[in-house]
């Protein structure tokens, strides 16, 4: 079982209106709710490829219940630690006339010390039988910056490899605890992150993915023409959030099952390049792109 942890999940509420004007009532034509948060998108993508995955983390209030329900509809098992505060919502309003989208993001909930303790206990219970853990996304208020480091240490004690997808202080505190794979949010954050005996570092590039491993550097690339041909019904340009979520999800099975670096890189880049803007997997595009990924390496540093 793969455990994908989202400590700051969101309920996405999408409104569509013919026209949006400030200072007046705006009739809404359609309303759609869906699950957001990097760890949960990764869980859905991993599940799409038939892997046993459980979405975990923190969820509370009515928004938390809707997050659970949304994952259940997608076939993803959940094991969230309940919190007293309401999980955050992100409201996105699309103006059909102008094509512009306005986003309103609620603040993250505050997590108490007692809730943090229950999270640690629930998480450690999930490690029994887990084949890999994903720690992805931002942290809510009240959680210490070293929380990812603690969760990685618990996983290491249980012999479970971790994929860490984070930035800022959460990345710095977690990277030193020996996750199997580190994926920094920003390329600049990779400075000083060196592959170790058990850790590798992955960065997205303009054309693909660069992996720094103990054996050297691997490069996976795919041409824009191949992406455009595979995604005829979607924009060919990269959607940064969808690409990143697909990239993280693409590495998880390989980390869990011990794939070779060429196989991991092909799967991860094909999934990232084929991911739809809403985070769903386009399986037809994926199958087309998989043989188009060119992997070279390893090159010595």
Image (cartoon, rainbow, N blue to C red):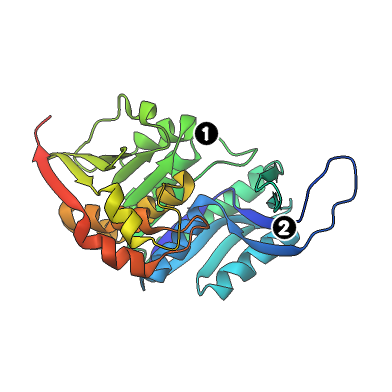
Q: Does residue 27 sit above or below 51 in this rendering? A: above
Q: Which of marks 1 and 2 is in front?
A: 2
Q: Quadrant of residue 12?
A: bottom right
Furthest-right residue in view?
Answer: 24
Q: In the image, what residue occupies the spot 21% across and 57% down?
A: 292
Q: Is residue 146 left or right of residue 10?
A: left
Does residue 250 appear anywhere in the picture?
no
Q: Is residue 44 shown above or below 139?
A: below
| Viewer-closest of 80 and 272 | 272
Q: Do the residues labelled 1 and 2 touch (CB within 8 Å)?
A: no
Say which quarter of the image contains residue 260: bottom left
Q: Residue 55 carries which label?
A: none
Residue 84 % position (x, y): 73, 53
Is disc 1 surrounded by few (<14), some (14 to 19) or many (20+) residues within 10 Å?
some
Give the distance between the C-alpha atoms of the residues marked 1 and 2, in whole angstroms: 37 Å
What label does residue 145 carry, if any?
Answer: 1
Q: Residue 215, position in %: x, y?
A: 11, 40
Residue assigned mark 2: 16
Residue 141: percent from the left, percent from the top? Answer: 65, 38
Circle nearer the N terminus (1, 2): 2
Does residue 106 lie above or below 86 as drawn? above
Q: How many labels does the image show?
A: 2
**Image position, residue 287 (x, y; %):** 28, 67
Compare residues 238 and 84 and report the one nearer the observer: 238
Q: Who's the residue at 36% across and 64% down the image?
A: 130
* Placement of the N terminus among the 4 image quadrants: bottom left
Res. 228 in view: yes
Quadrant in the picture for the C terminus: top left
Q: What element carries label 2?
A: strand
Residue visible at 36% across and 51% down in the picture: 247
Q: Is mark 1 on a helix, strand or loop?
A: loop
């Amino acid at each position: 079982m793969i455990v994908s942890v989202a400590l700051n999940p969101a309920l996405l509420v999408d409104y569509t209106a013919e026209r949006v004007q400030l200072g007046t009532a705006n009739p809404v034509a359609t309303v759609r709710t869906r699950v957001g948060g990097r760890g949960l998108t990764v869980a859905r993508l991993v599940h799409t490829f038939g892997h046993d995955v459980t979405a975990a983390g923190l969820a509370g209030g009515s928004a938390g219940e809707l997050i659970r329900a949304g994952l259940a509809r997608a076939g993803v098992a959940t094991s969230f630690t309940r919190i007293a505060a309401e999980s955050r919502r992100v409201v996105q309003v699309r103006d059909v006339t102008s094509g512009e989208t306005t986003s309103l993001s609620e603040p993250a909930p505050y997590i108490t010390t007692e809730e943090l303790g229950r999270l640690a206990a629930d998480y450690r219970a999930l490690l029994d039988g887990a084949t890999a853990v994903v720690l992805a996304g931002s942290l809510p208020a009240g959680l210490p910056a070293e929380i990812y480091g603690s969760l990685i240490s618990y996983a290491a004690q249980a012999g479970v490899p971790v994929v860490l997808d984070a930035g800022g202080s959460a990345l710095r505190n977690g990277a030193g605890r020996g996750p199997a794979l580190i994926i920094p949010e920003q390329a600049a954050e990779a400075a000083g992150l060196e592959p170790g005996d058990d850790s590798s570092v992955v960065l997205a590039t303009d054309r693909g993915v660069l992996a720094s491993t103990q054996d050297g550097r691997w490069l996976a690339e795919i041409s824009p023409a191949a992406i455009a041909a595979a995604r005829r019904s979607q924009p060919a340009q990269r959607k940064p959030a969808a690409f990143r979520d697909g990239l993280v999800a693409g590495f998880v099975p390989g980390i869990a099952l011990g794939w070779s670096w060429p196989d991991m890189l092909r799967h991860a880049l094909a999934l990232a390049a084929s991911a739809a803007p809403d985070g769903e997997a386009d399986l037809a595009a994926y199958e087309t792109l998989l043989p188009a990924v060119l992997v070279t390496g390893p090159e010595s540093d």
